[in-house]
Amino acid sequence: MNWLQLIERRVSVRQYEPDVDEATLAQVRKICEHAKSYNSSALKYFLLPGSEVHRRQKSIGPIGRVLAPWYIAAVAAGDSEALFNLGYSSQRVILELTALDLGTCWLGALFDREALGDSLGLGKGHAVRALIAWGRGRKVPGTVDKQSRRLPSEKIAFFAGDRDTRYPWRTVLEAVRWAPSAINRQPWRLWFGAGAVHLFSKPGRLARSFAPIDMGIALCHLELACKQLAIPGSIAQTEHPQRKGWEYWVSYIFD
Ligand SMILES: Cc1cc2nc3c(=O)[nH]c(=O)nc-3n(C[C@H](O)[C@H](O)[C@H](O)COP(=O)(O)O)c2cc1C
């Protein structure tokens, strides 16, 4: 399966079979050890069994705990660069787990961050910023139709008149559109221009603190889509257009 297929296939899985075999565990450990970073911010992954995590999870009203046999604890500093990197790197880990036919779910809240951090003996300033629940997904009938759970393309993308028409931009857009985001807020916005695709966010009141992670996830999808479609280029910050209400992050600049 290629990256575009993995992006399409991934959904948040919230119910799991109880066990994972040793060989799979070893594969996931290897994936975490070789995770690709975007910048030089410190990022560390810990593989934790359910027994270490379940007692530190919380539930609020109808929002229950996501009980998985295993979790990946993503540990980083709390600044925007570190969280952006965490989103970028961890989403690639998630897609690699999807390739192993494993279910995953990002968990940004509803766990005792301090207790988990203490048990891992984390250094000052570093904390478990997110957990990734993972395991063999349990088949749940009546899953919601994916299409109804994303903003329409015209709300998240702007196509400049002078954009390069050689490449399938709609496919790139779809790949970003299917990125997961905290409370499904979908803060990412894309500007398809002459020399680059620019990635922006639309700040909102809800889940603000998760924006850097969400944007790192979106960049992961943007880059993988461009590479898969053989669109030559690389990621960097560059001159970019201004759009009211949009905040600039980074661009995929064409060679
Ligand atoms: C940073 C982040 C934090 C998240 N936190 C939670 C969470 O605490 N609990 C949960 O059930 N889902 C959580 N999610 C999953 C989102 O709700 C989910 O990605 C979104 O609704 C889109 O659905 P999909 O992943 O199935 O495409 C989180 C996602 C992200 C990216």
Image: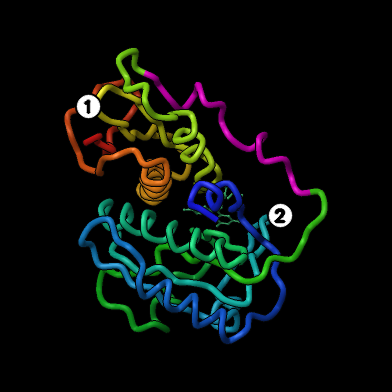
What SS does tag 1 mark?
loop
User: Which numbered tag is attached to residue 81?
Assistant: none
**Which quadrant of the structure image shows residue 144?**
top right
User: Which numbered tag is attached to residue 240?
Assistant: 1
Classify mark 2: residues with Cα within 10 Å, few (<14), some (14-19) or many (20+): few
* Relative side of 56 to 210, left or right: right
Whole-angstrom CA distance, mark 1 to mark 2, is 43 Å
Q: Is residue 145 magenta?
A: yes
> Can you see residue 70?
yes
**Which region shows up in magenta?**
143-159
Which residue lies under the disc numbered 2? 62
Work out which quarter of the rendered image holds the C terminus and state it. Answer: top left
Q: Position of residue 42 (x, y in %)?
A: 25, 67
Frontmost residue, 142 versus 211: 142
Q: Residue at x 36, y 25 (%)?
A: 166
Q: Residue at x 41, y 49 (%)?
A: 217
